[in-house]
Amino acid sequence: MRILLTNDDGIYAKGLQTLLEHIKPLGDVFVVAPERERSASGHGITVHKPLRANEVRPMQYAVSGTPADCVKLALEALLPEKPDLIISGINLGANLGTDVLYSGTVSAAIEGIMAGIPALAVSLVSYDENSDFSTAASITTDLCRALAHRQFPRETLLNVNVPQGSLEDIKGVRVTTLGIRRYKNSVEERKDPRGKSYYWLGGQVENIASREDSDLVAVSDNYVSITPVHFDLTNYRILEQIRNWNLDTLLK
Amino acid sequence: MRILLTNDDGIYAKGLQTLLEHIKPLGDVFVVAPERERSASGHGITVHKPLRANEVRPMQYAVSGTPADCVKLALEALLPEKPDLIISGINLGANLGTDVLYSGTVSAAIEGIMAGIPALAVSLVSYDENSDFSTAASITTDLCRALAHRQFPRETLLNVNVPQGSLEDIKGVRVTTLGIRRYKNSVEERKDPRGKSYYWLGGQVENIASREDSDLVAVSDNYVSITPVHFDLTNYRILEQIRNWNLDTLLK
């Protein structure tokens, strides 16, 4: 099995390196990851300047771009053959609900499925920099083994969020939907020493979990959350409604 | 009517300024847009450094961040009240199919609907910097007028792509689904003067329009394409299939 690891916390992040140690027995594992932290980079790609890839250790490349850049570069230039699986993570911090749109971790996995390669995005529900990733790494490795015996869904990644703690602390696994996360006070205005305004993005999370089977509910109940995520943002449910608007009259 | 305009080509881009002239009669129009081009920024937001907003003209702010940053800042700090509508564009270049995931234009509109505000993303199907945006601006203005008499769908934006040419050249309007766009040869390796490799992202488009009603087909037939886009990436169709995998055994 040929596996590509990437992330958005940077190639030296503990989450990626812990996963690498756990997953090595499964096959050939390549790492192509950003040379520095690129959190919240969304699905950005680098088109206005060239990219560099530095082989920092055998089969490990540090790239001067975003997580999505890393996957493009890995598939088209750095790896000898296409991988069988792409794993993005393990991210320090949850990637839940609507936040997945901002997530470099999930975007790297989306880049994988757009190229036809099965992908996992894995995150640890913790913001403590000293977090222990070994439980999450062990669950991810077992998940890879389990997936080898299942038909991996086409053009769909699995977005995995693992609660903190030991295996005994985790109550089970739930297959979930993406909930809705909003932030309040998401912009903070400050004044610089010359009295001019500048702004920090941030804010406090307001979870709006419309469905009982959402990822937000699962992790708050201490379950591993696994959400099937695809790359089609079309809202099929309202296609007919909008077709009935007869917008053709715009041109008359 | 209070309208917020933004884009990813930068506040001085011809597409935005042409739309501003056309749309002014509809109400109070604020512009909050990146101070420079931010194409392909995806849904990135700026969390590691603060943002600046410079009022370059009355009611027009140039922001040192991404399109999604602009919408957050507009809604939370710059505008006196929430707008009734957000329009992102008019972008120079189509935003079709899977490419919408990379699109700063569409991400700004997604940021709007996440905050509960109706939004349009508008793009001109042209890569010629001297393009005339007046037909697209006129269609967008008429669309805004038409929407005022319809129930705008909740948590859904309309992704509008307008072919080049005059009104007479355009055959009609189609309500479409997002097609699939892939790129071949998407990474080009070059050598610097010291013999070290660097890489450009690019490549040639391969349209894979799986559905006849896709946006890709519509614009190539010279129709205005309008796609309803939401922010839920859950693949509901395969939830049950994955639930039947009984992944709970991972923890045993």
Image (spheres, coloured by chain):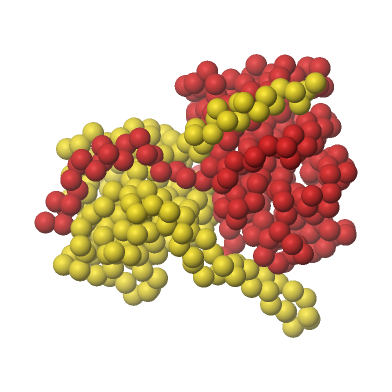
Chain colours: A yellow, B red
Residue A16: name its quadrant. bottom left
Task: Decide if residue B91 is on the left or right side of residue A123.
Answer: right
Q: Is residue B89 above or below residue B166?
A: below
Residue at the far bottom: name it.
A193
Q: Is residue B19 visible?
A: yes
Left or right: A8 as drawn, with respect to A144: right
Residue A18 at x, y percent in the picture: 27, 62
Foreground: A53 or B227? B227
Q: Quadrant of the C terminus of chain A?
A: top right
Query: Between residues B7 and A22, which one lies in front from this camera angle?
Result: B7
User: Where does the image place residue B185, in percent across and percent down from the top left?
Assistant: 50, 30
Image point (23%, 54%), residue name: A173
Q: Is residue B61 above or below residue B88?
A: below
Q: Is residue A61 visible?
A: no
Residue A227: horizontal and vertical position, in percent?
34, 48
Q: Residue at x 16, y 57 (%)?
A: B251
In front here: A244 or B185?
A244
Please identify the quadrant where the N terminus of chain A is shown. Answer: top left
Task: Identify the residue shown where x is 33% and y is 52%.
Answer: A213
Single out the residue that lies furthest toward the left: B252
Q: Name which residue lies at 11% across and 56% down.
A: B252
In the picture, measured across the screen, residue A205 lies left or right of residue B78, that is left
Q: Which percent across, then down, holds residue B181? A: 52, 29
